[in-house]
Amino acid sequence: MNIEESLNEAVIKAEEVVKNIDTIAALNQEKANFLGKKGIIAEVMKNMKDLSIEERKQIGMMSNTAKVKIEEIFTNKAKEIEEAIINKKLQNESIDVTLPSFKRNVGSIHPLMKTIEDLENLYIGLGYNVAEGPEVETDEYCFEKLNLPKGHPARDMQDTFYIDVENLLRSQTSPVQVRTMLKENGKPIKIICPGKVYRRDADDATHSHQFMQCEGLVLGSDITLGDLKGALLEMAKMMFGEEQKIRLRPSFFPFTEPSVEVDVSCFKCGGKGCPMCKNSGWIEVLGAGMVNNNVLRMCGYNPDEIQGYAFGIGVERITMLKYHIDDIRNFYTSDIRFLRQFKEVK
Ligand code: DAH
């Protein structure tokens, strides 16, 4: 057999050999038998030494062609084996989509949190920042600096839980006004502060010893009661619909002067009068006013240069009105049947 025939023979043999191989390891071993230093091709080439230069050139080309072919045979086989492995894996790991899946219960946002988020979105959009303060507060910040000195009769309405004589669970979010003013030190302020408050109340359908408020405070050189009305009208519209109107009635809070109680037009009867609004056409939703000069002074502000408004929204109150909830205790008892109803609320 001459060299050319031997080379062709080697290619044919390679084709035969790979047919019975089904692992990459065996394939590599076999590949070495053909193309390795002591492989079939190398053996064939040993016989070249007796040839002329011209013949060597020719045989060299032939052997290259044979090597490329054999190389290709092994590469193709390797691909084939790898594909087979993947296909087998896919088959073994295939998912039976007809099997019933695990059902994960998706929760929903708590209605009070929903209201707070709505308030934050609204007021952040109007340029307010969201401030926070501690629930364990000092008597000084919760009352004294808000113009409610010890023994003031208005403290009766806000009896709370005392840690000791000077520290208590805050009965309102208003002390965050004090904290913000002391920090800002005479500079303009525009904040809301949602949070928990506590009172020594007997729980019933409309009272809870713990509830939530959202405080607002805006101070600047030209802030008026008109601005307050605008800020609250936007809130009423966001909560109860675009057609909402609001009404300010004179009231009293030690930390504001003048003070107002704010009503929204009854969304049930549209203002005509019904049991919901006790036939008045209006529903009270919050307290507000222009920050009392005493408070400004005690918190480091000069009332001749800077003044503004404050408001305190009862988060439960507006949430109960919006979603027609008739018992405040529903918010805290974690009854899944109650909470589920808010799943679809956007
Ligand atoms: N803190 C008051 C309360 O708990 C609500 C309130 C009224 C807050 C008037 C204010 C305000 O900031 O200006 O009853």
Image (cartoon, helix red, strand yellow):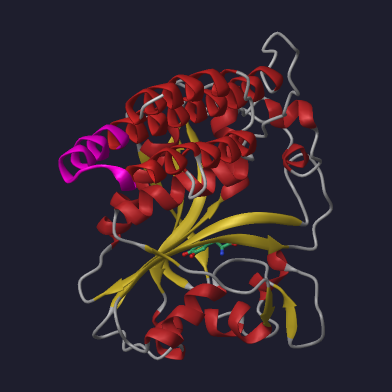
- x, y (%) of residue 74? 47, 30
Q: Is residue 307 left or right of residue 84?
A: left
Q: Is residue 200 left or right of residue 319?
A: right
Q: Residue furthest top?
A: 98
Q: In this picture, which residue range is highlighted in magenta?
A: 49-63
Look at the picture and state if 343 lies above or below 311. above
Look at the picture and state if 131 lies above or below 48. below
- x, y (%) of residue 61? 23, 36
The picture quadrant where one finds residue 17 is top right
Q: Is residue 243 left or right of residue 277?
A: left
- The reply to whether residue 244 is in sight is no
Look at the picture and state if 263 lies above or below 274. below
Residue 56 counted in the magenta span: yes
- x, y (%) of residue 110? 64, 40
Look at the picture and state if 54 lies above or below 232. above
Q: Nearer the viewer, residue 38 or 35?
A: 38
Residue lying at 33% horizontally and 43% vertically, measured from the top left? 48
Residue lying at 45% horizontally and 79% vertically, measured from the top left? 180
Residue lying at 46% horizontally and 42% vertically, measured from the top left? 43
Q: Nearer the viewer, residue 69 or 82?
A: 69
Q: Nearer the viewer, residue 90 or 119?
A: 90
Residue 328 counted in the magenta span: no
In which quadrant of the rendered image does the N terminus lie? top left
Q: Residue furthest front?
A: 50
- x, y (%) of residue 167? 74, 83
